[in-house]
Image (cartoon, rainbow, N blue to C red):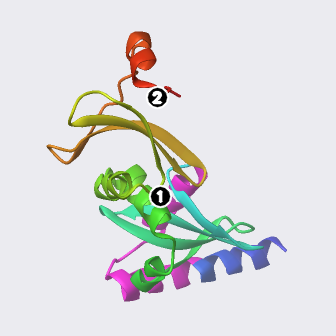
Amino acid sequence: MGRDLSEIRKAQRSHAKKRFEQQFALVMNRDRIYEIEKKIASGQAILIESRPQIRNYFVVIEGKLIAVGYNKFTKRVVTALPEAYLETLPRDLVSLARFRLLGDENGVISDIVSGRNGQLLHRQDEFVSHYLLQYPGFSFKTGYDRSANRLVPFVKQSASDRRHSGLSNI
């Protein structure tokens, strides 16, 4: 069985290399694919979906968000999924991945402005408000400055401000 598993892993890695080159013009070698596998194992990836033997994850490769297929049994990256696959996924999942893995705030700001995935916790002043953002499997608190259209650090509301505002701080 050990030799069979070795051959399977070798074929999976070969297939993955081919898909990375076809889909993204990325030349991958064993070490680069192993780095992706380490990211998945260490939680530096975001799970997209899980089927009996394959899990799809978002990972960052050369500063780009890419979806990969990962075989749970062999613990190998087996494919790179095309850009079109991302368009089939829930918008909030892609926004979360861009924010957590790339530091891209645009999706989170869009969710705050549109009222998706966010709950107002309190207003700091006429421009800055603080929110609880909730995504599948992940939530965080942040501030949003609408005059500058950017995220700002979350600041707890003082007890006296809480009494006057009628909003509770979670």
From what the image shows, is residue 142 above or below residue 116?
above
**Residue beneath label 1, please?**
35
Find residue 106 and report its image quarter: bottom left
Q: Is residue 31 visible?
A: no
Mark 2–mark 1 Cα distance, whole angstroms, equals 45 Å
Q: Which label number is shown at residue 164?
A: none
Q: Is residue 103 positioned above or below 61 on the image?
A: above
Q: Could you say where residue 65 lies in the image, as x and y percent from the top left?
A: 38, 66
Q: Position of residue 109 (x, y in %)?
A: 31, 52
Three-letter code for the amino acid on which mark 2 is drawn: Leu
**The N terminus - image quarter:** bottom right
Tell which residue pokes out farthest to the bottom in this image: 22
Tell me the chief SS of the magenta region: helix
Which region shows up in magenta? Answer: 13-42
Q: Is residue 10 in sight in this rendering?
A: yes
Report the side of 74 relative to 84 (left or right). Answer: right
Disc 1, SS: helix
Is 58 on the left-hand or right-hand side of 124? right
Residue at (49, 26) in percent of width and height:
169
Residue 21 lies in the magenta stretch: yes
**Label 2: element kind:** loop
Tally of numbered tags: 2
Q: Are marks 2 and 1 in contact (CB under 8 Å)?
A: no
Within the image, what quadrant is residue 113 found in? Answer: bottom left
Query: Residue at the left extreme?
Result: 148
Residue count near mark 1 (Cα–Cα under 10 Å), binned few <14, some 14–19, many ≥20: few
Residue at position x 53%, y 58% in the image: 46
Q: Which residue is mark 2?
A: 167
Out of 92 and 25, give the one closest to the viewer: 92
